[in-house]
Image (spheres, rainbow, N blue to C red):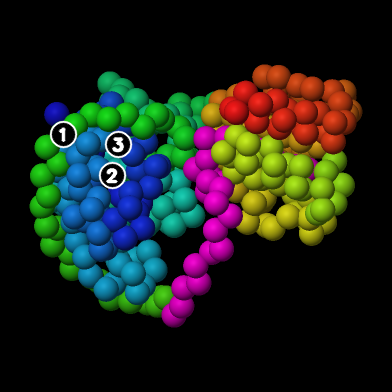
Amino acid sequence: MAEVLVLVDHVDGAVRKPTLELLTLARRIGDPVAVHLGPGAETAAPVLAEHGAVKVLTADAPEFTDYLVVPKVDALQAAAAAVSPVAVLVASSAEGKEVAARLALRLGSGIITDATDVVAGDDGPVATQSAFAAAFTTRSRVSRGVPVITVKPNSAPVEAAPAAGAVEPLAVTFGELATGTKVVSRTPRKSTGRPELTEAAIVVSGGRGVNGAENFSVIEELADSLGAAVGASRAAVDAGWYPHSNQVGQTGKSVSPQLYIANGISGAIQHRAGMQTSKTIVAVNKDAEAPIFDLVDYGVVGDLFQVVPQLTEEIKTRKG
């Protein structure tokens, strides 16, 4: 079969879940070839092989950690020249989309961003996207060059599919632009013990109806009982009740979990744009006419301060 490049998203060799999802999608259209850049390849390679990578191309150089974006583009361009892939798949993070866009430009190819599915087509891979604040679903393919596709987290299951995973060095020549933007410092983010918002299988969000920063503990307790990430609407963030890093919506983060629980969120279009591709949506709102109820799979009309604690307690009871 033809080969599909998958850019590995990792932290010192610890492979992040979206990469394993990309390997699942890559197997639908060809043989996955993982591209691991930076330290930790010896740790990552067995995991990548277990999830379907027939080859693991590796390159390690200070440029990958000391400079932004461009060194990774140089490496992916070298990998594309070496493999002649039928597609390149990248996780839809802010960095991933910039890498993908620069690579597509260099390859003279088209790009599809924020795909929620990728399948094989008669004339190349076909990607599914949500468009116009998720009001429409589109299916598209790249008509020129090697398709470069970024895929939203939680778009595919993580499936074990053991493959050879042969590790091969990738020769990379860095261009003049590779050292144009240097990383001068890094500050580790304080861990909450909860999943990363964009990667979480379950997200519990609060909005204007939470009515204060002190009340977000109700949302956090439900999230913790489910092992979920915590999100917030723009109204809650603008009011200073929760950090902007947790904002879900058009001007925040886009999420696509298996389960999304919206509490005290009216369902403004900018919020819907960031969560409408969630597989199952549940809403709790005391306003029966709230727009969010047009979107949900299950809705509860009621006071979140009565409903959410009861739900949390029931979950704890069943788990206990």
Q: Which region shows up in magenta?
A: 184-208
Q: Which label was assigned to residue 163?
A: 1
- Disc number lying in front (3 or 2): 3
| The stretch drawn in magenta includes residue 10 | no
- In the picture, residue 272 is in which quadrant? top right
Identified at 23% across, 70% down, the residue is 61
**Badge 2: few (under 14), some or many (20 or more) residues near its Cα, within 10 Å?**
many
Q: CA distance from mark 3 to mark 1?
A: 11 Å
Q: Earlier in the sequence, mark 3 or mark 2?
A: 2
User: Taking the image as drawn, is residue 256 in sight?
Assistant: no
Q: Amino acid at mark 2?
A: Val
Identified at 30% across, 36% down, the residue is 23
| In this picture, residue 94 sits left or right of residue 207 | left
| In this picture, residue 63 sits left or right of residue 165 | right
- In the picture, residue 22 is in which quadrant? top left
Q: Which label was assigned to residue 6?
A: 2
Percent across and percent down for residue 112 are 42, 40
Percent across and percent down for residue 188 are 49, 67
User: Taking the image as drawn, is residue 56 in sight?
Assistant: yes
**Badge 1: few (under 14), some or many (20 or more) residues near its Cα, within 10 Å?**
some
Residue ID for mark 3: 23
Contact between marks 3 and 2 (CB within 8 A): the answer is yes
Q: CA distance from mark 1 to mark 2?
A: 15 Å
Instruction: Give the quadrant of the C terminus.
Output: top right
| The stretch drawn in magenta includes residue 189 | yes
| In this picture, residue 157 sits left or right of residue 189 | left
Contact between marks 3 and 1 (CB within 8 A): the answer is no
Identified at 67% across, 50% down, the residue is 247
Q: Amino acid at mark 3?
A: Leu
Q: Main secondary structure of the magenta part?
A: loop
Q: Earlier in the sequence, mark 3 or mark 1?
A: 3
